[in-house]
Image: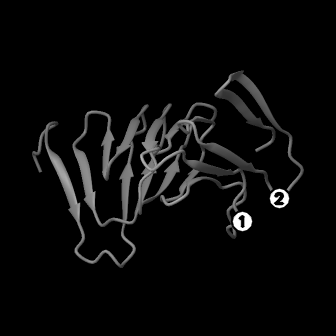
Amino acid sequence: KNLGAGGTLVSLDSDNADSDTLVYNGTNGSDAFTVGFASIFLNARVVVATTDVESYTLRGKGGDDTFTLQAQQGIAILVEGDEPSGSDTLNFAADNSGGDPVVIVELDSDLPNAPFLQTIEQDGYGIVTHTGIELVNMDIEGGDLYVAGTRGDDVITFTPLSGDSGVLTAQNI
């Protein structure tokens, strides 16, 4: 209580063998989430830093939300966009500190009761799962990008913009 905008909330867990999840709820307005090294920033709220937390759930709720994150070692991230549709954005940056990253995008995971739940995975890092996100921007820093379609018929299009960038679209997803 009364930490102030410059304060930091630290979540510690001494048992790193369990499965802890930190849930950070946005507001009904437009929010800007940023995930850095084991820390979550949301608008001008208190920073949340974590130790030995295995997963984050970021809930955008209403408004035009933006989620900016870098792949996290040992931390799975669930990003939940919400209303209104057509306006939530996920900005994903791969970590190239260990060389050129390999990133896999699955447009339809095979989890039960979760049709078209989309994932982004960098080898050796936690999986980023997202739902309710209409636009995903990715920076894989010179690495390789692999895209797996859905269980149905897909129309996936890549439009090059330069020698190392482009736009990937998938219809009806």
Residue 170 in the image: state x and y as whole percent.
Answer: 77, 39
Observer-nearest residue: 162 or 32? 162
In x, y percent, where is residue 90?
A: 53, 38
Mark 2 Cα shell of 10 Å, populated few (<14), some (14-19), many (≥20): few
Q: In which quarter of the image is the C terminus?
A: top right
Give amino acid for label 2.
Arg
67 and 1: which is toward the camera:
67
Q: Residue furthest front?
A: 99
Residue labelled with disc 1: 110
Relative to 51, say whether 128 is above or below. above
In this rendering, the answer to whether 15 lies above or below 23 is below
Q: Mark 2 points at which residue?
A: 151
In-front residue for pair 86/142: 142
Q: Which residue is drawn at 16% across and 36% down?
A: 5
Front residue of 21 and 75: 75
Q: What element carries label 2?
A: loop
- State if disc 2 and disc 1 touch (CB < 8 Å): yes
The residue depicted at 67 percent of the width and 24 percent of the height is: 163
124 left or right, relative to 2: right
Lower position in the chain sequence, tag 1 or tag 2 = 1
Q: In this view, does 118 lie to the left or right of 45?
A: right
x, y percent for residue 37:
32, 48
Residue 152 disc label: none
